[in-house]
Image (cartoon, coloured by chain):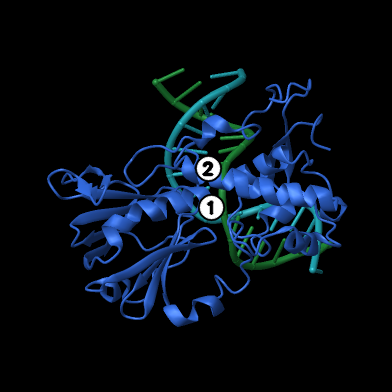
Chain colours: A blue, B cyan, C green
Amino acid sequence: MPELPEVETVMTGLKPALEGRVFTHVETRRGDLRIPFPKGFAKRLTGRRVTRLWRRAKYIMVELDGGETLVIHLGMSGSMSVYAQGADRKLGEFYYERADDGAGTGKHDHVVFDTDAPARIVFNDHRRFGLMTLIGTEAIGAHKLFKDVGVEPLSAEFDAAFLSQALKNKKTPIKSALLDQRIIAGLGNIYVCEALWRARISPRRLARRVRPGEIETLVREIKAVLREAVKAGGSSLRDHKQVSGELGYFQHRFAVYDRANKLCQRKDGGTIKRIVQSGRSSFYCPVCQR
DNA sequence: CGATGCCCCTGAGAGC
DNA sequence: TGCTCTCAGGGGCATC
C-alpha cells in the first residue's frame, strides 16, 4: 500500500487515539511478520505513555515515555484501524469506526493495542510484509533501519542542489534513482510515476542525463504531488484506508499510474504506456515524457 | 559500486 | 464454478 502520503495519513489519524495516551493492553496474534517481534514486545509497551507520533520515510514512529520508540512499517498491505470506544465514536475532532466486540479478531489482524483514550487500534496486514519493532529513542538514527535513509522530500533540505548532486554520475534510470530510499525517503511507485509525468521526464532517462532546469521542475513536482496526495488522504487502490475506515481519494487524480492504454491528459496524442523497470511497473506518456 | 532477479505472502481479477 | 496465471503503494538479499 503505502508511500509517504498514505503513511502520513495513517500517522495523523492515529494521533488522537495515541498521543498522550497509555497502552493498557497489547496483544500480538502472530509472530511472523517481516521480522520477529522483539522480546517482551507487549510487556514493554503496556503501561507506557505515548509522548508523540511522527513519520520518517515510510515508517510510523510512536515515541514512548520509557525511552523506547515503537516503529511501524505497513509493508504493501498493512493498515491500522482505530475503534473509538466512547459512545459517539469520537476522539478529539475525529470520528472512528464502531468498536464492536469483533474488532481485532479478523484473519489478518496481527496486533491489537488498547489505550485509555479509550480506543482499540488494530494492525491488519494480509501479506505480512509489514514490521513492528522497538528501538531505543536516542539510537534511532544509528539503527540499521534508518542509518542509510535519505532526505525527506517535503523538507527544505530537499532542493535542486541536493537532487542534482545526488543524480550526478548516476547511470541508473531516473525512475530507479527516485525509488531509492537512500536518496529520497518515502517515494514509491505511484508518486514517482506521477512526478515524472508532471515534470515531462521519461522514467527511462538516465539519472545523470536530467538537466538542471528539469531537476528544478522535478523537485517542485515531487513536493506538489506529495502535498496534494496527503491532503487527499492518500491513494486507495486495494488496501489503503484511513484509520477511520474512510478511503483516500488521490487515485482519482492519477495522470499515469494504473492508466495503461488511456490517452494522455495533455491531449498530445500520446497513449499511456506500461513498461517494467527493475521488476516494477512504470507508467508514462511517450509523447510528452522524453 | 550498479543492475537484475528472486524472495517474502495473500488475494483479486482476468482468461479459459 | 473453478482452475491457472499475473499482478499488487515495499524492501532485503544474492549474484554477476
Using the image, determine if residue A181 lies above or below residue A195: below
| Chain of the residue displaying label 1 | A
Q: Chain of mark 2?
A: A
Residue visible at 43% across and 49% down in the picture: A9
- Between discs 1 and 2, the one toward the N terminus: 1
Q: Nearer the viewer, residue A107 or C14?
A: A107
Q: In the image, residue A237 lies at what x, y percent?
A: 50, 36
Identify the residue shown where x is 16% and y is 50%. Answer: A85
Q: Is residue A50 left or right of residue C16?
A: left
Of the pair A123 and A170, the residue shown nearer to us: A170
* Left or right placement of residue A171 versus residue A29 in this view: right
Task: Say what amino acid the circle numbered 1 marks.
Answer: Leu
**Please, is residue A49 above or below residue A129 in the view?**
below
Q: Which residue is mark 2?
A: A229
The secondary element bearing badge 1 is classed as helix
Q: Position of residue A47 (x, y in %)?
A: 22, 73
Q: Do tag 1 and tag 2 residues touch (Cβ < 8 Å)?
A: yes
> Where on the picture, by quarter, is residue A270?
top right
Three-letter amino acid code at disc 2? Ala
x%, y% of residue A79?
39, 49
Label 2 SS: helix
Q: Residues within 10 Å of mark 2 (few under 14, many from 20)?
A: many
**The C terminus of chain A, quarter of image:** top right
Vertical relation: A155 (above or below) A267: below
Please give the residue where the numbered disc 1 appears in the rendered image: A4
Residue A169 seen anywhere in this rendered image of the structure: yes
